[in-house]
Image: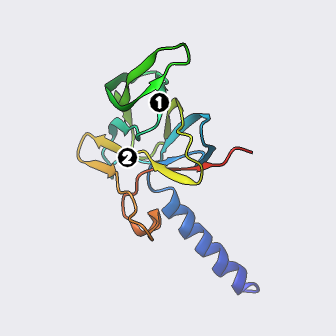
Amino acid sequence: MRYPLFAGAFALACTMSAAAYSHVTLEAQQAVAGSTYKAIFRVPHACGESPTIRIRVQIPDGVTAVLPQPKAGWQLATVKAKLATPLSDGHGGQITEGVREVTWSGGKLQHDHYDEFVLRAALPDAPNTTIYFPVVQDCEQGANRWIEIPEPGKTTADYKQPAPLLRLLPKP
């Protein structure tokens, strides 16, 4: 081969890309703290040969005003719970509960297909932090639990089933 260095780099890039896309991730992994964010969860495969039949997303503390997008062929459900700290509603009142989990179910994502699940939410005003959205991908047979949150000093690359992450940036 005339370009062995290029071939080696290309092979490494392909391997890294395959690893990066083998789990549920957020399309945009950075957003401005305190902003409204459109979370697009990318689901690149099912559980082996078994189709995905449900996606459950846990909403991190501090993420509010969650509005999931309905998806044709899937049922949408939310679980609400009391907020640890009430928030102002901007009109003199308080918001005391919010969406803590979003579930899309009843559809079928085949093992050789790709899909996206979307919600919109207000992000906490906590620049230079990272938040995680644990996701459980239930299949007809088995499940993938993308729920691992790195310990201090580690990254998602150190885990087999890391939770999708979002880095909160300072306001420009």
At horizontal 52% and vertical 39% (from top left) the residue drawn is 124
Front tag of 1 and 2: 1
Indicate left or right for 8 with 158 as reference.
right
Q: Where is residue 101 in the image (x, y as percent from the top left)?
A: 35, 32
Q: Residues within 10 Å of mark 1 (few under 14, many from 20)?
A: many
Find residue 51 and report its image quarter: top left
Residue 92 seen in the current view: yes
Residue 93 is marked as none
Question: Which callout, 1 or 2, points at the residue further toward the start of the chain?
Answer: 1
Quadrant, the N terminus: bottom right
Answer above or below: position of 49 versus 87: below
Answer above or below: position of 30 versus 117: below
At horizontal 72% and vertical 79% (from top left) the residue drawn is 6
Q: Where is residue 106 in the image (x, y as percent from the top left)?
A: 32, 26
User: Which amino acid type is marked by label 2?
Assistant: Pro
What residue does disc 2 label?
134
